[in-house]
Image: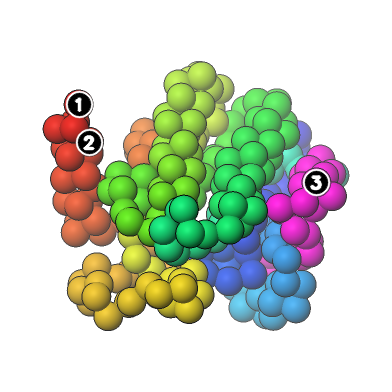
Amino acid sequence: MSDHKITALVTGASAGLGAEFCRQLATRCEVIIGVARRGDRLAELVGQLPGEVEFHALEADLNSVEGVARTMETLRQKGPVDYLVNNAGFSTFGQFAELPIDRQRDMVSLHIDTTITLCKAAIPFMCELGGGHIINVSSMGAFVPGKGLAVYGATKSFLNYYSLALQAELAGTGIEVQALCPGYIHTEFHAEMQDQGFDKKRIPDEMWMTPGEVVAASLASLGSGRVLVVPGEGNQSVAKMGLQQQLDAL
């Protein structure tokens, strides 16, 4: 594929980690496909990208069959992609038994169903290309079960296991799979949770990271052979303690 352009597809690209992935991948890629529900925010992002990268904004709701189908078709038309970043996600906050079940099911659909569907669509083309990178945005919540985040943490645990198993299956293909497990980040993600009772002030300042720091850690880890990537030394310590607590519960 001598005329192939280095291409990335990023979901949840209108803000937070997704927008930052677009910014930092713009120095590695010639084409970026940004997928998000908010088309106006995608339009703003174009002017923030460095270099001469070609940006395609796809306004789509990945919690809908139509939105996933349009994304898959764009992937087929604009691909193959060298980078697939499954970043789209959200979280509710509150006791599971007291929260609307529809919102919990939407979270499972977006974090799990959409991720595996886009991976399934991208992998054959990556194999033809001779390699690629899949980054599934997971969370520290996969290691440390937390009250108020039952379904969210469970979906992220799935992404960790799925990424580890998928990497084992793709050994020798040149495709690298990563589960990025950030902790607290200064983005709209946690700001929205505050309306549901999440108190940012209870989290020590040193536990917070910026989107730039998290994405830089993710991209720097590519090629290292590590599937589970936890940015920040403090987060790594907490993740190890969480895993130990799970083992102690056996």
Does residue 161 appear to the left or right of 246 in the view shown?
Answer: right
- Residue 177 visible in the snapshot: yes
Residue 238 locus on image (x, y percent): 20, 52
Q: In this picture, which residue range is highlighted in magenta? A: 51-76
Task: Give the tally of numbered discs.
Answer: 3
At label 2, counting other C-alpha atoms closer than 10 Å, the crowd grade (few under 14, some 14-19, many 20 or more) is few
Mark 2 vs mark 1, CA separation in Å: 7 Å
| Badge 2 element | helix
State the residue position of label 2.
Answer: 246
Above or below residue 187? Residue 249 is above
Residue at image location 41% in from the left, 40% down from the top: 157
Circle 1 crowding by C-alpha within 10 Å: few under 14, some 14–19, many from 20: few
In the image, 14 versus 2, the foreground residue is: 14
How many residues crowd mark 3 within 10 Å: few (<14), some (14–19), many (20+)? few
Indicate the amino acid at tag 1. Answer: Leu
Depth order, front residue of 165/202: 202
Label 1, on which residue?
Answer: 250
Q: Quadrant of residue 93?
A: bottom left
**Looking at the image, is 179 positioned above or below residue 209?**
above
> Quick check: marks 2 and 1 in contact, CB under 8 Å?
yes
- For residue 65, the mark is 3
Answer with left or right where residue 114 lies relative to residue 60.
left
Image check: 175 left or right of 5?
Answer: left
Mark earlier in primary sequence (2, 3): 3
Q: Amino acid at mark 3?
A: Val
